[in-house]
Every structure is written in structure tokens, then in C-alpha cells.
Image (cartoon, rainbow, N blue to C red):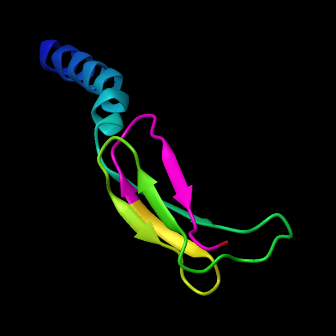
Amino acid sequence: MRAFLVLSLSLLILAGLLPGIAQGQAREVTGVVVNEFGQPLETAIITETSTGAQAVSDREGRFTISVPGGEVELRFENFGY
């Protein structure tokens, strides 16, 4: 009975900690960059402001960028547009 109680408490504590642990893990953000007419923007530069990680959109405006866990800020730039 005692082993069951210790295991149950351990699982409850671990379950409570998992959201905090997961928040610190990197994740991928994907999206599509479009102009005001809904047309995809090729070669737009997407920057995660805290780490400086960057991605560039493809011909269809699609991008994938790795960002840290938690709240992030992305900056979008497209020169010559």
C-alpha cells in the first residue's frame, strides 16, 4: 500500500511539473506569409527576436522556424516589397 501511495504521489508531482518542463523545450512554428491581397510572399525573412533564429519563406510563402518554449515574438521582413 505504501509503495502505491508513493508512486501515486510521484506521478502527481511529475504531472504538475510537465507543463513547466515542456515550456522550456524548443518547438517548430510553421506558417504562410502573404501580402494584403492574400498572395504568398517569397523570400520573406522570419526572425525569432530573443534568439535571432531565422527562416526564409519559400515560393508559396511557407516557412518553418524553431523557437524556444514559452511566449515568443516573430519579426517578418520582406525587402523590396
- Please indicate whether residue 73 sits to the left or right of residue 49 in the image: right
- Please indicate whether residue 50 sits to the left or right of residue 55 in the image: left
Please, which residue is most extreme toward the front here?
80
- Please indicate whether residue 52 sits to the left or right of residue 1 in the image: right
How many numbered marks appear?
0
Please, which residue is most extreme toward the bottom here?
59
Q: Is residue 71 magenta?
A: yes
On the image, the x and y values in percent for residue 43 come to: 53, 78
Instruction: Give the magenta range.
Output: 66-80
Identify the residue at horizontal 33%, vertical 38% (top origin): 22
- Which quadrant would residue 35 be assigned to in this image? bottom right
On the image, the x and y values in percent for residue 40 come to: 71, 77
Identify the residue at horizontal 82%, vertical 63% (top origin): 36
Please, which residue is most extreme toward the left here?
3
On the image, the x and y values in percent for residue 13 come to: 27, 18
Q: Main secondary structure of the magenta part?
A: loop
Note whether 69 is above or below 13 in the view shown: below
Quarter of the image containing the N terminus? top left
- Please indicate whether residue 62 sits to the left or right of residue 7 in the image: right
Quarter of the image containing the C terminus? bottom right
Compare residues 7 and 47 and report the one nearer the observer. 47
Note whether 2 is above or below 53 in the view shown: above
Please, which residue is most extreme toward the right here?
37
Identify the residue at horizontal 58%, vertical 67% (top origin): 78
Compare residues 53 and 20 and report the one nearer the observer. 53
Identify the residue at horizontal 66%, vertical 76% (top origin): 41
- Which quadrant would residue 3 be assigned to in this image? top left
On the image, the x and y values in percent for residue 65 come to: 42, 62
- Which quadrant would residue 31 be assigned to in this image? bottom right
Compare residues 70 and 14 and report the one nearer the observer. 70
Compare residues 28 and 13 and report the one nearer the observer. 28
